[in-house]
Image (spheres, rainbow, N blue to C red):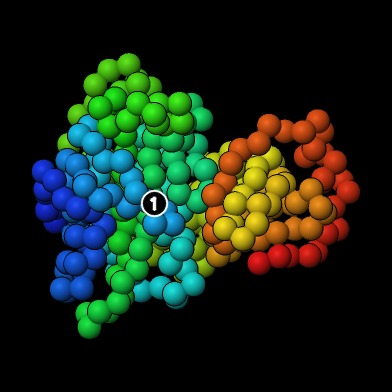
Amino acid sequence: MRTLNFQIVRFEEIDSTNTEAMRQARNGAFEGLVIIASRQTAGKGRAGRTWNSNDGGLYLSLILRPDVDFRQIPLLTLMAANAVSDALKESFGLEPDIKWPNDILVSEKKICGILCETCDSEFGKAVIVGIGVNVSEDALDEELCEIATSIERETGKPADIEEFAKRLLHSIATHYARFTFDATKTVVLADWQARSSYCNGKDISVDTGREVIEGVTRGLHPSGALFVMQTTGKLALITAGDVKHLRPRKNSSDEIAETNRDADSVEL
């Protein structure tokens, strides 16, 4: 079981905490180095998107050097999501939901995004776990208020970013220890499934970049990929894509489950 010893480096402003963590990792930084910034000028989101990074958010990137099979690295995104979910619940009494694979929702609005990136260097492989949490209302641009929320909005009172950072790192350390101890990684999958309404029976659409797939979620593959029973009757395995919750069609989940009980076609 691995124990994380954190060393925190703080910036008032930086281009991207993930970018800085990657620089440090390529220079030989050890596991447990944490980059925290008050704001980012070029924050990273998934698929090359930018992450709005105003004052009032927690922007954190952590260097990990797990001794795992390359195919298990995507599970670190799920591990981080579990840790954030628990920290929000334990610190503020919130009831977070996890939208596959890396968005934390409260009241069906995004409160946190997670981006894991890998890098190679002469010092070996590293995984950068980037986490951005909307702590105060100042973190939200006006045009995002319909789809995003903050800890302050959900609790009705200000939150201390530094105190939350401590609780979050403690939660990450706990979940990472479980992750490294479990060779099969079934624990991280079970933890994620227990914290996400998107795991089973959720009507969704997924934009994979090549096509849009609609259907009902049917759990996780051991790799962390998402099974979706399509309206076409085929079972799709989603390895990457943007997920949107759809309003359920009348009896759609029951009909799909019944008519496709024996479906065995998996599309990659």
Vertical arrangement, residue 106 with respect to residue 268, above or below? above
Front residue (pair 174, 17): 17
Q: State the image coordinates of residue 25 (x, y, percent, origin top left).
A: 21, 69
- Location of the N terminus (image quadrant): bottom left
Q: Which residue is mark 1?
A: 49
Q: Name which residue lies at 32% across and 57% down.
A: 129
Front residue (pair 41, 9): 41
Q: Name which residue lies at 81% across and 52% down.
A: 232
Q: Quadrant of residue 204?
A: top right
The amino acid marked with disc number 1 is Arg
Q: Quadrant of residue 252?
A: top right
Instruction: Report helix, strand or loop for mark 1.
Output: loop
The answer to whether residue 42 is seen in the rendering is yes
Q: Name which residue lies at 24% across and 21% down.
A: 158
Q: Quadrant of residue 179?
A: bottom left
Q: State the image coordinates of residue 48 (x, y, percent, origin top left).
A: 39, 57
